[in-house]
Image (cartoon, rainbow, N blue to C red):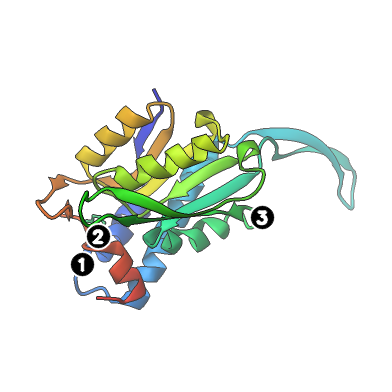
């Protein structure tokens, strides 16, 4: 079973409390999403492997640590996932960014994939799939299906969100028990309209000012 972790750093909790408030406007919301994503990225990247290299300082030759292993890809689920990309890129500026777009079919209410644009070597990369809200889990499940279909190994996929509903975590873990899931908060439940309670409303609308 993959790891499930609520990342409870005090700065993350503080920023998330501001993010949730109705009174927080688009500019602050956008900045906070990026800041929380960066802090989540910092925690998650603790596990990246290191190797020794020899370097030369102005004083002497020395053996020091450098990141080894797979290169990174950040894959936002459109639209709201875009809000988390810059925060993580500020930590790992060389990461490539893929996009997975989905819309909700009005009749079946199921997510339908309309765009997949990934780095060519996605099967060789460590992947952070990002979406602020893990609600029903439908989009996350489909996005990870899509990555696995293109050769991404489960051990290389981490799903990263800001707020998760228990229903979404359960569905995602049932569909993809082999990936790691990280969130800044595990909320109470989903309401009848598919919103997370207490949540923060529609993350995409609040990020882009489209309400
Ligand atoms: N998507 C959102 O943006 N907010 C929710 O509460 C649930 C899904």
Q: Quadrant of the C terminus?
A: bottom left
Disc on res. 21:
1
Q: Is residue 78 left or right of residue 171?
A: right
Q: Secondary structure at mark 3?
A: loop
- Vertical position of residue 183 compared to residue 154: above or below: below
User: In x, y percent, where is residue 60?
Assistant: 90, 44
Number of on-image labels: 3
**Label 2 environment density (alpha carbons within 10 Å; few <14, some 14–19, many ≥20):** few
**Picture coordinates of residue 14, whole percent (x, y):** 30, 58
For label 1, the SS is loop
Q: Quadrant of residue 8?
A: top left
Residue in the foreground of this view, choosing between 138 and 87: 138
Q: Position of residue 180 (x, y in %)?
A: 42, 34
Query: Where, by quadrant of the figure, is residue 138 drawn?
Result: top left
What kind of element bears circle 2? helix
Q: Is residue 91 above or below residue 176?
A: below
Q: Earlier in the sequence, mark 3 or mark 1?
A: 1
Which residue, as the protein is rendered here, is positioned at the far front? Answer: 107
Relative side of 69 to 181, left or right: right
Q: Residue at x 20, y 74 (%)?
A: 23
Q: CA distance from mark 2 to mark 1?
A: 7 Å
Tell me if mark 1 has few (under 14), some (14-19) or many (20+) residues whose alpha carbon lies within 10 angstroms of its own.
few
Given contact means CB atoms under 8 Å apart, are the residues at marks 2 and 1 in contact? yes
Quadrant containing ligand 1: bottom left
Quickly name the residue at label 3: 94
Residue at image position (17%, 52%) is 194
Q: Residues within 10 Å of mark 3 (few under 14, many from 20)?
A: few
Which residue position holds label 2?
17
Instruction: Determine contact: label 3, label 1, CB under 8 Å.
Output: no
Q: How far is the residue under mark 3 from the one under mark 2?
A: 31 Å
């Amino acid at each position: 079973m993959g790891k499930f972790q609520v990342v409870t750093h005090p700065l993350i909790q503080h920023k998330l409390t501001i993010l949730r408030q109705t009174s927080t406007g688009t500019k602050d919301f956008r900045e906070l999403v990026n800041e929380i994503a960066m802090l989540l990225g910092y925690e998650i990247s603790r596990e990246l492997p290191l190797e020794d290299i020899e370097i030369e300082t102005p004083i002497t030759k020395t053996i020091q640590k450098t990141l080894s292993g797979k290169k990174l890809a950040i894959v936002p689920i459109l639209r709201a996932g875009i809000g988390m990309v810059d925060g993580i890129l500020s930590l790992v500026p060389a990461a490539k960014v893929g996009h997975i777009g989905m819309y909700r079919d009005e009749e079946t209410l199921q997510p339908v994939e309309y765009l997949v644009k990934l780095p060519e070597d996605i099967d060789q990369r460590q992947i952070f799939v990002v979406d602020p809200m893990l609600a029903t889990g439908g989009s996350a499940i489909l996005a990870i299906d899509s990555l696995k279909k293109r050769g991404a190994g489960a051990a290389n996929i981490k799903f990263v969100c800001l707020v998760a509903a228990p229903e979404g975590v359960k569905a995602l873990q049932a569909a993809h028990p082999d990936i790691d899931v990280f969130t800044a908060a595990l909320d109470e439940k989903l309401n009848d309209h598919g919103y997370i309670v207490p949540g923060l409303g529609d993350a995409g609308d609040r990020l882009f000012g489209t309400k």
